[in-house]
């Protein structure tokens, strides 16, 4: 499937309701795109981000357990609030 998309990542991730919630609003507002869940293990986090950086359709992701802190050194920059908190919830 091509076209713009975003996703939620974590380990585990099957329990996430985010695709249903965001999918509802994409459809309701008539916005092009999709929202997925992607199972990313700790040892695959750097490779996941490297691959997504090269995907022109990827718009970003929400980050859930256990990656909220582990993604920080893998990012180009971090919002000051996330830096103070020491955790990231959203990557663009």
Image (tube, helix red, strand yellow):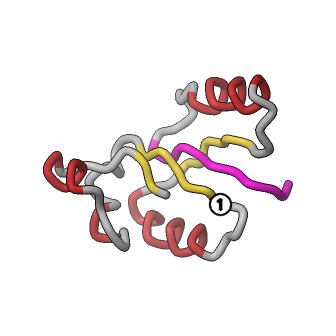
Is residue 5 on the magenta stretch?
A: yes
Viewer-closest of 69 and 6:
6
Q: Is residue 44 toward the left or the right of residue 59 in the image?
A: left
Residue at disc 1, secondary structure: strand
Q: Quadrant of residue 52?
A: bottom right
For the point 80% across and 44% down, the residue is 32
Q: Residues within 10 Å of mark 1 (few under 14, many from 20)?
A: some
30 relative position to 11: left or right: right
Report if residue 30 lies within the magenta region.
Answer: no
Percent of width and height locating residue 42: 39, 58
Name the residue that disc number 1 marks: 58
User: 2 left or right of 35?
Assistant: right
Q: Residue at x 55, y 48 (%)?
A: 39
Furthest-right residue in this view: 1
> Bounds of the magenta span?
1-11
Task: Determine whether 72 is above or below 68 in the image.
Answer: below
* Residue that lies at the very extreme toward the left in this rendered image: 84
In percent of width and height, residue 12 lies at: 47, 39
């Amino acid at each position: 499937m091509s076209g713009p998309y975003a996703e939620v990542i974590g380990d585990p991730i099957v329990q996430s309701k985010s695709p249903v919630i965001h999918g509802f609003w994409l459809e309701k507002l008539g916005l092009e795109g999709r929202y997925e869940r992607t199972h990313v293990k700790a040892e695959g986090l750097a490779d996941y981000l490297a691959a997504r950086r090269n995907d022109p359709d990827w718009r970003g992701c929400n980050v859930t357990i256990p990656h909220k802190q582990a993604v920080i050194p893998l990012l180009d920059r971090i919002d000051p609030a996330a830096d103070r908190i020491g955790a990231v919830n959203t990557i663009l």
